[in-house]
Image (cartoon, helix red, strand yellow):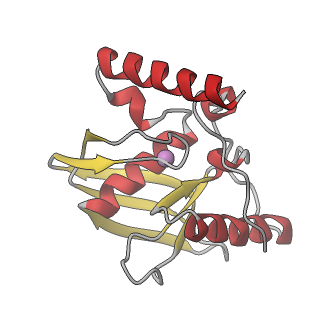
Amino acid sequence: MAVLEILHYPDSRLRNKAQPVKHVDDNLRRQVEDMYETLYESQGVGLAATQVDIHLRLFVIDVSETRDQRQCVINPEIISKEGTQYELEGCLSATGAYDRVERALKVRVRGTDLDGNVLEFDAEGLKAACVQHEMDHLNGILFVDHLSRLKQERYRKKVSKLMAVKE
Ligand code: NI
């Protein structure tokens, strides 16, 4: 297993729209193992394939405090939504940005697991926000895109300053 490199805003590869997974092979299984390792190493709650430069429709999540409720959803779809919440979000690809984003409070998710079995489950609260956040990544959308123009501009400036310091 290996910890993968995470792409960071404003990397244009984060804007790619991921393609459906056609079949799961050993290579993809290895990549998913690496994604879990990367998720736990970075202490995140979710990681979409797009963030590690794999442009396929899948994500891994674990919103548990015990870090033992890992789940991989392949070709995820949200089939119903209910309510509204404003969970505080951050992103492994958007260092230093934390803000509240409007999301559905409850979602019903459908996809498949690594063995090709149909997965269907309800998520609420943090897990629901996380699923919606990861699905955005697969469509090339970052949570900062949901913020006001002013906040986006501030974040863009903050990141370009940080990048200038690094060079
Ligand atoms: Ni993210």
Q: Nearer the viewer, residue 64 or 154?
A: 154
Left or right, 84 with respect to 23, comes to left
**Residue depicted at 57% across the width and 65% down the height:** 39
Image coords of residue 99 (percent x, y): 29, 40
Give the total of numbered labels.
Answer: 0
Which residue of the protein is positioned furthest toward the front in this rendering?
165
Above or below for 27 versus 148: below
**Residue depicted at 41% across the width and 27% down the height:** 145
**Residue depicted at 66% across the width and 64% down the height:** 35
Above or below for 42 versus 166: below
Image coords of residue 19 (percent x, y): 68, 42
Q: Nearer the viewer, residue 3 or 87?
A: 3
Left or right, 91 with respect to 103, comes to right
Left or right, 148 with respect to 69, comes to left
Above or below for 148 versus 78: above
Image coords of residue 51 (percent x, y): 63, 46
Image coords of residue 16 (percent x, y): 65, 32
The C terminus, quarter of image: top right
- Corner quadrant of residue 110: bottom left
**Residue depicted at 47% across the width and 35% down the height:** 142
Left or right, 24 with respect to 58, comes to right
The N terminus, quarter of image: bottom right
Q: Nearer the viewer, residue 5 or 112?
A: 5
Which residue of the protein is positioned furthest toward the left in this rendering?
83
